[in-house]
């Protein structure tokens, strides 16, 4: 049974800081791993998707890495801005794409 | 904008009642999945439909059921509502559901059961 854990649960940083969010998963037989952003009371926006054969993906100030053998993924946010304040969730999709399991998220607050 | 719309945005029901939540996927997206998100937690997978057939289900009882229609709309039905069913319900669509594409989420329906 796949379990996804995110550390830390919450993070407060000053504007401009580079930061790393961590995600671990118990079953390495994943099809892909996605990182999402969620604003309060809203739906999820997909930020990055890493296929199981890939090791990282980049979009603007965001970089996500995947290490299947250790069951870990990290989301790196460069030069954080107050607009980055949100909850970041990682999610692992099992082989076949039938089920996506989410972590509980990291609540990020970037102080101006 | 993800192109996925959900209705209603908020709903209040009484324990024991039945509720139907609706989702309209992006045109061309043959897969829709539904999630339940309790406050402060990540979304929990309820089930997935591909071309009107359920092809995956999470750990939810049979009183949670769904339908998918040819016009890219879908429904989540919950019977015999319980207090613990209070949550944000999210639908997500993707073209094939095979895991090679991103999931596109709607903004959700906030259900309160009193």
Image (cartoon, coloured by chain):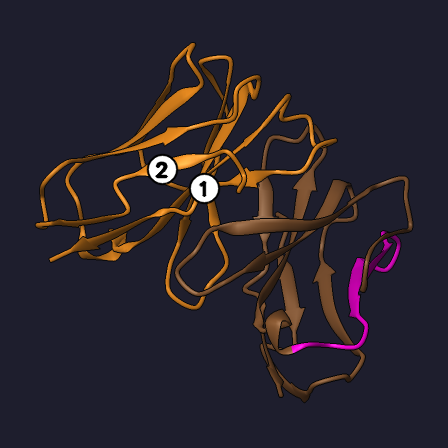
Chain colours: A brown, B orange
Horizontally, residue A70 falls left or right of residue A97, namely right
Horizontally, residue A42 falls left or right of residue B8, namely right
The question of residue A67 being in magenta is answered with yes
Count residues near mark 2 (Cα–Cα under 10 Å), then give few for <14, some for 14-19, many for 20+: many
* Magenta stretch, overall SS: strand
The question of residue B22 being in magenta is answered with no
Q: Is residue A4 above or below residue A19?
A: above
Which of pointers 1 and 2 lies earlier in the amino acid sequence?
2
Tell me what residue is drawn at x 70 percent, y 32 percent.
B99
Give yes or no for contact between labels 1 and 2 (Cβ–Cβ under 8 Å): yes
Tell me what residue is drawn at x 64 percent, y 58 percent.
A4
Horizontally, residue A4 falls left or right of residue A62, namely left
* Percent x, y of residue B74: 37, 24
The image quadrant of residue A11 is bottom right
Per the rendered image, the range of residues in magenta is A62-81
Tell me what residue is drawn at x 43 percent, y 9 percent.
B70
Q: Quickly name the residue at label 1.
A: B106
Tell me what residue is drawn at x 60 percent, y 30 percent.
A98
Count residues near mark 1 (Cα–Cα under 10 Å), then give few for <14, some for 14-19, many for 20+: many
* Percent x, y of residue B86: 25, 55
* Percent x, y of residue B47: 45, 33
From the viewer's side, name the closer residue of A15 and B6.
A15
Indicate the chain on which mark 1 is placed: B
> Mark 1 falls on what kind of element?
loop
The image quadrant of residue B102 is top right
> Mark 2 falls on what kind of element?
strand
Q: Quickly name the residue at label 2.
A: B6
* Percent x, y of residue A72: 80, 61
Q: Are marks 1 and 2 on the same chain?
A: yes
Q: CA distance from mark 1 to mark 2?
A: 6 Å
């Amino acid at each position: 049974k796949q379990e996804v854990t995110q550390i830390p649960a919450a993070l407060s940083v000053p504007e401009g800081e580079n930061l790393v969010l961590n995600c671990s998963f118990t079953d390495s037989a994943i099809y892909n791993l996605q990182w999402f952003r969620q604003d309060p009371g809203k739906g999820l926006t997909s930020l990055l998707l890493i296929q199981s054969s890939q090791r990282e993906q980049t979009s603007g100030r965001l970089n996500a890495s995947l290490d299947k053998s250790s069951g870990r993924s990290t989301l790196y946010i460069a030069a954080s801005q107050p607009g980055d304040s949100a909850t970041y969730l990682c999610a692992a999709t099992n082989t076949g794409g039938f089920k996506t399991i989410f972590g509980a998220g990291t609540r990020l607050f970037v102080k101006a | 904008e993800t192109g996925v719309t959900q209705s209603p945005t908020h709903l209040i029901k009484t324990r024991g009642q039945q509720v139907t939540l609706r989702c309209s996927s992006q045109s061309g997206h043959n897969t829709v999945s539904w999630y339940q998100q309790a406050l402060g937690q990540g979304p929990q997978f309820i089930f997935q439909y591909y071309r009107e057939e359920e092809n995956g289900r999470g750990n939810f009882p049979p009183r949670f059921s769904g339908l998918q229609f040819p016009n890219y709309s879908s429904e989540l039905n919950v019977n015999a509502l319980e207090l613990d069913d209070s949550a944000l319900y999210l639908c997500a669509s993707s073209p094939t559901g095979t895991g090679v594409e991103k999931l596109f989420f709607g903004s959700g329906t906030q259900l309160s059961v009193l």
